[in-house]
Amino acid sequence: MRTACDLLIRNGTVCDGTGAEPVCADILITGDRISGIVPRQDGGASPGSIRAGRTIDAQDLMVAPGFIDVHGHSEFTLLADPRAEGKLCQGITTEINGNCGLSAAPLFGAVMERRRSDLDDYGIEERWSSFEEYFALLGNRTIGLNVCTLTGHGNLRGCVTGYDDRGLSPEELRQMGMLLRQTVREGSIGLSTGLIYPPGMYADRQELIDLCTVLMKDGSSPCVYATHMRSEGDRLIEAVRETVDIGRRAGIAVHISHLKTSGERNWHKLSEALSLIEAAQAEGIRVTCDRYPYTAASTDLDTVLPSWTYEGGTEDELRRLRDPEARGKIKAEIQSRVTDTTYWERIVITSVASEKNRWMEGKDLLRIAREERCEPVDLLLGILVEETLRVGAVFFTMSEENLRTILSRSYVMLGTDSSARSFGGPTCKGKPHPRGFGTFPRFLGRYVRRDLASDMSEAVRRMTSLPARTFGIVGRGVLRAGAYADVTIFDPRAVCDRATYAEPFTRPDGIHFVIVNGVPAVWEGECTGSRAGRILRNGR
């Protein structure tokens, strides 16, 4: 009796995502599902027993579930260019957006005003206020990979109260809770915070506990709290304690975004931070983390300013930067904590809004200041005003040894902390962090295979089934009959990243095939142009 399928993956070493030992097996895909897995020791899917529309010979290759990027920022780039080539080429088939307190919705009032320039930069003319409206727009685009989203606390607070530095009234907190419930009904998988950014930085611990409690009271909610903590450097330990306490008091699973020790004077704190996390796990609090395999961070350049400059929103921040008295105070505060010129060498401009300053992209602030014949701090303040704050940067602040230690932990997943971009079109601009093109291949090649000599099955588990279980993503993250056919096929001996800070738009090596919902998205290392991704509301 002959069996029919749409796609047959033959002769591969199957790493099913659970952490189990790999097995030699053939995989049958019919429609958007895996219809069968036949171990080779049982004879495999012999040519005479199966009729396949297409066949992949995976001899000497590893067949794994599609990778899940737990920390994406593709809310707008997927509307601008839904191909997501930079993610697909890494083997990513699903990404979680809405991180660091910033999500696609709710989007109205002061939050829409703040994000308007981002929309304009990508030529996005549509406007929306809810996830329901956003998902409709995204669905009409047809997207290259699966997407689910958290609700950004910054969106909730900004929509209700704007960007003022103050506590909430009971009525404002009630409104935020109602908005959060609405986003969950529309498909959100949890709540995220960005506690170094306005307006998240203005929230006290009780506000966050109260909102997490709203999630826990809604039986349909996924109950995940993901946080860019209040500090990743000087007050790292206090921030970890706060995160654990929120999980304990709200009874919610907590996920620490891009766990790091920022600044050399803080590198020694990692051991205590990990001890706090693991003690909380032993107590029964669900705590997980993610990290990208690089020692440089990337975010907005204005994060180097004193926090008081942000209050009130973009226009108030710019007003302070233009005011001689306030600018002098800002400059003095920055100079008081900058001890040597190497600080400025470790900050590299990745993007600017104007054509005039495009030449600065890819250069560090000290080099630019010398070319401009000015002090680095004056250059910093000047460029922020000229570009109306729309400047991205890379910050080289982390320890390689600490990175290896973090990546070795069984509860640490992979996140690119990047938006989905493509190798041409509206998202192909600037010098973005190479993590958007190399995170997963770099982890597999440099860290799993070389530096850590880790077990490949365990590494795959932390890129697939662990994220799926943590964030409630149903039917993905494992290879088994009946699961969705998200599959990544790679060469474990050759996989590696090739993207650099100077040339980020560079494909990795060793990722040969990527299947999204049964449709080939990468075939023999090249993007096919297919867009079979789906919006996973509440992870489904």
Image: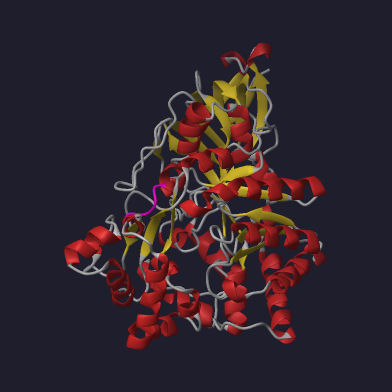
Q: Quadrant of residue 282?
A: top right
Vertical order, 502 against 216 (above or below): above
Give 407 or 74, whichever is nearer the viewer. 407
Question: In the rendered structure, does residue 200 fall within the stretch colored magenta?
Answer: no
Q: Residue at x 43, y 26 (%)?
A: 494
- The N terminus appears in which quarter of the rendering? top right
Left or right: residue 309 compared with residue 279:
left
Which range of residues does the magenta coloring cover?
430-434
Q: Quadrant of residue 333?
A: bottom left
Question: In the rendered structure, does residue 431 fall within the stretch colored magenta?
Answer: yes
Q: Residue at x 59, y 54 (%)?
A: 257
- State the image coordinates of residue 352 (x, y, percent, origin top left): 31, 66
Left or right: residue 196 compared with residue 332:
right
Left or right: residue 70 compared with residue 306:
right
- State the image coordinates of residue 311 (x, y, percent, origin top left): 50, 81
Give 322 or 461, whichever is nearer the viewer. 322
